[in-house]
Image (tube, rainbow, N blue to C red):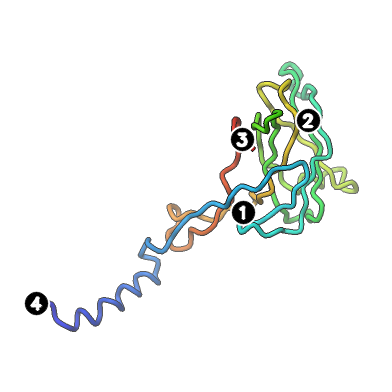
Amino acid sequence: MISPRVFAVAPLALVLLALSGCSSWGCTDTRAERGTPGARVRVVDTDGRPLGVTAVVVDWRLEPHPQVPADGDQVHFRFRFDGADENSGPAVDVCAVDRKRVALGCQTVESSQAFGPAAASRTGDDWLAVEHPERVAGVLFIPNDQSYDRRTCAVDVKDGGGMHPPEQPSRGDQL
């Protein structure tokens, strides 16, 4: 028979284990929902709150990359981050899409890239490599900030978990 003293001490021991991080039932990882892509988006955090920064695709064109012209046309795009500062700002995903808004190629662009040598204009430029450049109909930003992705429960049960940015888009995703 179990003594009444064990029943009195057991809840306290469970609470101490949970508070010490030795328990994994309190850690959960969730992903934010992907926001609506656009050529001009208000950047949001993982809770969907605006960060006060707007990411804008200024223009884009198809042309050979100067360092690898033999690869043929790629997507050369210019962008701007309004409201971001040089030292700490968001990063968002950018995708070249076809007429049906299917991603042909994507990557992450940091707002700090818009403060290079052309700091007065606060614009930057980059390249997207796509298999079929002739199918590109536009370049879109996805508004979710990708600059901070906290530790996962698998990596750190005690301090990990919580809301993470949405999965990054990849070729073939419908945007």
163 or 21: which is nearer to us? 163
| Lateral position of residue 101 relative to residue 62, left or right | left
Q: Is residue 134 above or below residue 29?
A: above
Write down the residue under mark 1.
Answer: 148
**In the image, what residue type sits under mark 1?**
Tyr
| Lateral position of residue 148 relative to residue 52, left or right | left
**Nearer the observer, disc 3 or disc 1?**
3
Cα distance in 3D space between marks 3 and 4: 62 Å
**In the image, what residue type sits under mark 2?**
His
Quadrant the N terminus occupies: bottom left
Q: Mark 1 or mark 3, which is nearer the start of the sequence?
A: 1
> Cβ–Cβ below 8 Å for labels 3 and 4?
no
Cα distance in 3D space between marks 2 and 1: 26 Å
Cα distance in 3D space between marks 3 and 1: 24 Å
Write down the residue under mark 2.
Answer: 76
Which residue is most to the top? Answer: 70
Which residue is most to the front? Answer: 100
Please tell me which residue is depicted at 34% across the width and 70% down the height of the picture: 17
Cα distance in 3D space between marks 2 and 4: 76 Å
Write down the residue under mark 3.
Answer: 174
**In the image, what residue type sits under mark 3?**
Gln
Residue 73 quadrant: top right
Q: Mark 4 or mark 3, which is nearer the start of the sequence?
A: 4
Q: Secondary structure at mark 4?
A: loop
> Cβ–Cβ below 8 Å for labels 3 and 2?
no
Mark drawn on residue 62: none
| Lateral position of residue 74 relative to residue 1, left or right | right
Q: Secondary structure at mark 3?
A: loop
Write down the residue under mark 4.
Answer: 1
| Lateral position of residue 6 relative to residue 169, left or right | left
Q: Mark 4 or mark 2, which is nearer the start of the sequence?
A: 4
